[in-house]
Amino acid sequence: MRTHWTNSLKIAGIAVSVVLAGCATSATAQEPAAATAATSAEADSYPFVSGDFWEVTGIDIKPGGGLAYANHLAGKWRASQEFAKSKGWIKDYMVLSNYHNRAGEPDLYLITVMADIPNGPESEAQYEAYSAWADASDAQMEAENADRAEFREVMGTSLMQELDFKD
């Protein structure tokens, strides 16, 4: 049951229980094998440093669901993001509209920016704190997530890492 709640919370844009297997946390770790054999001097010349993580969730709004979903985002979703921000779990969040979306593309992107991905114990502590703040059981939160399925579909979530130019 915990996995379903984690997915629901992740869909809400709070990355408190992200489980990553083999996630590269630096730009140089993502380079081809030949590049990893670079000398120290060559590695120092790489023009990027690893920055924040961006969780981007694509949302398709079902016909007639725009106002209901906008109200959800402006209410509960925003409040949960502000709670996470007040705790230092996230740095920022935003909603972007896909102005010229083509068939099969999301209508909205929900973005959460965080400095780090929480480890297991951090994730559990965040889960407990969020549950207390939300004052809702896992079953209640899952039911709320299922209710939103009436007016939106989550098309997918990507976890990206910002690459900042070295100065």
Image (cartoon, rainbow, N blue to C red):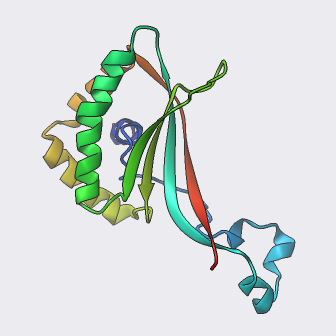
Numbered circles on residues, count: 0
The residue shown at (46%, 44%) is 111
- Indicate the position of residue 150 as horizontal and vertical percent values: 38, 13
The residue shown at (50%, 53%) is 54
Q: Nearer the viewer, residue 2 or 63?
A: 63
Q: Quadrant of residue 32?
A: bottom right
The residue shown at (35%, 22%) is 69
Residue 142 in view, yes or no: no
The residue shown at (37%, 59%) is 91
Q: Quadrant of residue 29?
A: bottom right
- Quarter of the image for the C terminus: give it: bottom right
Relative side of 38 to 15, left or right: right
Q: Is residue 125 above or below residue 101?
A: below
Q: Quadrant of residue 122?
A: bottom left
- Quarter of the image for the N terminus: give it: top left
- Indicate the position of residue 99 as horizontal and vertical percent values: 56, 27
- Indicate the position of residue 138 as horizontal and vertical percent values: 24, 36
> Farthest residue in the right direction?
34
- Indicate the position of residue 47 as horizontal and vertical percent values: 71, 75
> Farthest residue in the top direction?
64
Q: Is residue 99 above or below residue 84?
A: above
Relative side of 38 to 101, left or right: right
Relative side of 134 to 18, left or right: left
Residue 158 in view, yes or no: yes
